[in-house]
Structure formats: structure tokens, C-alpha cells
Image: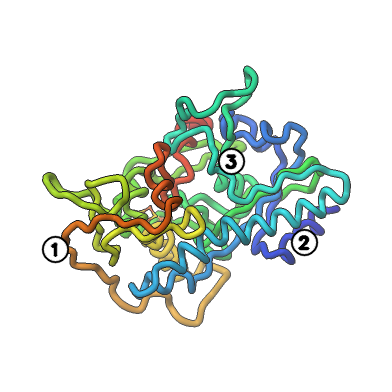
Amino acid sequence: MTSAEIKRLAKSCGADLVGIAPMDRFEGAPIQMDPRFIMPKAKSMIVMGFRVMRGSLRGIEEGTFFSNYSAMGYGGLTYIYIPMTVMNICRAIEDEGYEAVPLGHQSDWRGIDNQGNLREKYSKAVEEGKPQPDIMLHLRICAYLAGLGEIGYSKMFLTPEFGPRLRIGVVLTEMELEPDPIYDGPQLCNKCMACVKNCPGNAISATKTVKVNLAGHEVEWGELDCDACDIAMRGGEICAEGEIGKYQPGRDDVKPGSHSPFYNKPANVYNSGQAVCGARGCTRACMISMEARGVLGNKFKEPFRTKKLWSVDWSDYEPVEYAGTSLSDLGAHTSKFGERGEKAETNADAKTFKEAD
Ligand code: SF4
Ligand code: SF4
């Protein structure tokens, strides 16, 4: 199969964007994030972009329908749509006699925490010199290395077609495919800082940045406070001194933020979907900024935002005990490892990818 045939197949299976990276672009990757430890004989990484519908952000923008983004724009894409696409591509490649690893959602068992530290007493390397299971691919870096776009100041991956409205799926294969160049088109992130100003958790630093060197290219983004994002993306806000908040199961120091209408964080959909914040800063604000600049290929007849952002008045807030909706939901929120924020794949990159000069 040629690269062109793989791309045609991926698009017919549901991918919006497809790029191919040769494995040597991962030279210098940290051991816990190096795909070559998953498949030592891999020759190519096929990276696919799947758009998040702008319509999936509409209900949150209106303040009336919150689950759709978590379901159709997040968990459903991640756990159903992307896995089906990557598995179908792998089937075609394996029919040709080359092994292929389908990577849809791939970080649930990862051996590192949000800061890139090894999770203690979680797993052991099976042999000296190997990473501690599981390896976690940094999907945005994979997409960058396959030429799909840029990593923006917000650390969201930006493409010329959809801006930050994207999720990523990957296939690793022993098949050698013609690679794509690293993206060198018009600059997508203009450092407008709309992401920073609109993040309800102040999770993206306006001043501190992270620089990494990816296949010889210096890439920089704003330092992300994963813990702050974890709370705010679920709609929460840390209580003031002396206050009690029961918004988030397993804690009594989080109350609903003005960007959430819920007394308690609603149940996850498809395991990871709990993005009450609706990616207010990192996706919605960035998308609005990019659409206004006219830099995106996916154009709409009407602007996305037509009125002032709503805000919930919680001055009458009284904690309501979390009743839970299912055991798995409660379990997910009390796990020691915890969960990840909407955009916080990991901060491991900050420490472990070769720091740029
Ligand atoms: S909102 Fe502006 S600064 Fe932030 S990522 Fe998007 S374009 Fe870059
Ligand atoms: S998801 Fe984006 S906008 Fe929401 S808290 Fe996290 S960084 Fe901020």
C-alpha cells in the first residue's frame, strides 16, 4: 500500500486529516513516551485528526446542554469513533503482511503521572532498559511530527482546517510509507492569548512557557497547571479559606464555578468525558480567535459567539452531598492517580523531551 492509498482509506473510514511520520523523528523522545518501545520494528506512524463538531460546543455556549461535548466531542470520539477507524486501517495493513498497532485511546494505563513522574508502586519495567508500562504517546507531538499542524500557545494542537477542534488517533506499523514534511504553512497561533484570558481555571500561564525540541524544531507553549485544569474543566472552583464545597466527589474543597450550572459534577460519559468547562478558553476562545482571523479552512456561515458569555451566580451556594450515578463514576473520581484535564495529556514533555535552547 502507498501513503496515498492509506490516506484515502483513513478518510473513507472517518478520519478528517492524515499525516505520516517516520520513526526517526522520535529520536530523543523520553523513554516513557517513545513509540519505538511499543513496536521496535515500526517504520511509520500514521496520525489521524478527527474534528470535534463546532455544533458539539453549541449547547455549552448557550448554557443549556452540556453533555454533548463530553459525549460526541470527547469520549465518544475517543472511545468509539477513533478506535473503529484505526482498527479498520490496521486490518488493511495486516492483510498486506505488515503488523500494525491500533492506537485510539491509549493512556488509561500509563506509567507516568501528569507531571511525567513514574507512578510509584504501579508497574515495573519487565527488563532493564525498558520503560515502565504503559508507555504513553504524546498525541499532539505525534500529530506535529506527522505534519498535521502546530502546537498552539494553549498547548492544544492547531490545524489549518479546524484550529483546536481536533482529537487524534494513531497507527504504528512495520510498513514503510512515504512521510509528510513537518508543518511549515502559515503560522496558526498568533499569541493572541485568548486561551489564557478565557480559561476559567487560570490554568495556562501567560508568562511561563515550555520549550521542547521536536525533530530539530523548537516548539514552545504556555506552561499548563494540570491540577488547575483538572478542577476547572469539570466545572469546579477551589473554595475560599473556611468554605466547604462538595462539587467534586472525594473532595470537600471544590464548589461549582461560575462556568458550571451543576451543584455536583455530572457523571462521566464514555469514561473520560466530563468537560463541563466546554474547553472555554483553550478551544472555544481559540477557535473564535482563529475564525475571526479567517485562517481556518472549515468556514461557517455564522459566527460562533453572538452574545456575551453567561456566568452562574453561586452566591447562594450550599453544598449538596454527591449522590453518584454509578459505582464506576465514583471509582473514577476517587482513584489515587486521578484523572486528567481536558487538555492535559501530560506535562511530562516539559521535563523529558529534549529542552530547546
Ligand atoms: S487562543 Fe491565541 S494564543 Fe491561544 S493557542 Fe489560540 S491562537 Fe494561540
Ligand atoms: S479545558 Fe482548557 S479552558 Fe478548560 S480549564 Fe482546562 S485549560 Fe482551561
Using the image, determine if residue 2 lies above or below residue 222: below
Q: Tell me if residue 181 can be seen.
A: no
Extreme residue in the top direction: 128
Q: Which residue is mark 1?
A: 315
Mark 1: few, some, or many residues within 10 Å (few <14, many ≥20)? Answer: few
Determine if the C-beta at disc 3 is less than 8 A from ligand 2.
no
Residue 80 sits in quarter? bottom right
Q: SS at mark 2?
A: helix
User: Is disc 3 surrounded by few (<14), some (14 to 19) or many (20+) residues within 10 Å?
Assistant: many
Position of residue 319 measured from the top left corner of the image (x, y, whole percent): 19, 57
Is residue 90 in view?
Answer: yes
Toward the viewer: 256 or 193?
256
Q: Position of residue 330 (x, y in %)?
A: 39, 50
Provide the residue designation for mark 2. Answer: 9
Position of residue 319 in the picture relative to residue 167 (left or right): left
Q: Is residue 179 left or right of residue 283?
A: right
Residue at the spot of label 3 = 137
| Depth order, front residue of 86/209 | 86
In this rendered view, identify the residue nearer to me: 330 or 310.
330
Residue that appears at 36% across and 55% down: 233
**Distance from label 3 to label 2 (Cα)?**
23 Å
Task: Indicate whether 227 appears above or below 77.
Answer: above
Mark 3 vs mark 1, foreground winner is 1
**Quarter of the image holding residue 316?**
bottom left
Q: Earlier in the sequence, mark 3 or mark 1?
A: 3
Identify residue type, mark 3.
Leu
> Which element type, helix, strand or loop, lies under badge 1?
loop
Q: Is residue 9 left or right of residue 287?
A: right
Q: Is residue 82 above or below residue 338?
A: below
Percent x, y for residue 93? Answer: 82, 50
Q: What is the CA distance from the residue labelled 3 to the residue labelled 1?
A: 42 Å
